[in-house]
Amino acid sequence: MAADAVHLHRALWCAAALAVVLGSRPLIAQNWMAQNWQDLSPRERYDAMQNYQHHQQLPEDRRKDVERGYERWRQMPPDERARVRQNYDRFQKLNPKEREQFERKYEKWRQQRNPPPQ
């Protein structure tokens, strides 16, 4: 039974990470994350299951990317997590034009940081 609890806890974290990656409503509220299934509201349980099922349907390499992101997230100091959440909240509030500008700037930055192979 303990293995099932660990698997569920990891699935919830992966679902939350996937929600952030995909831009859907995350299960994270401020600095709190449900520690077990019983702590979630019926809506949060539904969202978690939807996210988890979507995660399971992703191609293997994409699932691995999400899981690596989850591990990076878990290892972040709490203040860094708070900064990421704050930035994500600000991003979610951008209007379409601002979001498009941000995405263009981000893509340009990303290409400069990791130039394509020649």
Image (cartoon, rainbow, N blue to C red):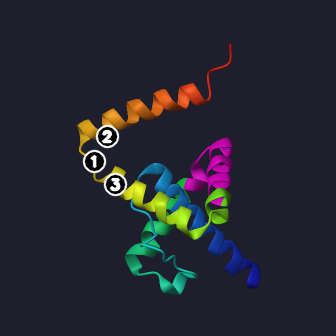
- Residue beneath the point at 25% across and 40% down: 96
Where is 104 relative to 76, above or below?
A: above
- In magenta segment, residue 90: no
For mark 2, does the 10 Å Cα neighbourhood hold few (<14), some (14 to 19), or many (20 or more) residues? some
- Residue beneath the point at 54% across and 32% down: 110
Where is 25 relative to 34, above or below?
A: above
- Residue beneath the point at 65% across and 69% down: 10
Image quarter where the C terminus lies is top right
Q: Which mark is residue 99?
A: 2
Foreground residue among 59 and 23: 23
Q: Secondary structure under badge 3? A: helix
**Picture coordinates of residue 11, whole percent (x, y):** 61, 67
The amino acid at mark 2 is Arg
Q: Is residue 69 left or right of residue 50?
A: right
**Picture coordinates of residue 52, whole percent (x, y):** 55, 62
Q: Quadrant of residue 111?
A: top right
- Magenta extent: 55-70
Q: CA distance from mark 2 to mark 3?
A: 10 Å
Q: Circle 3 is placed at which residue position?
A: 90
Foreground residue among 65 and 90: 90
Q: Circle 1 is placed at which residue position?
A: 94
Where is 45 relative to 60, above or below?
A: below
Q: Secondary structure under badge 2? A: helix
The amino acid at mark 1 is Leu
Foreground residue among 83 and 19: 83
Label 2 vs 3, first from the N-terminus: 3
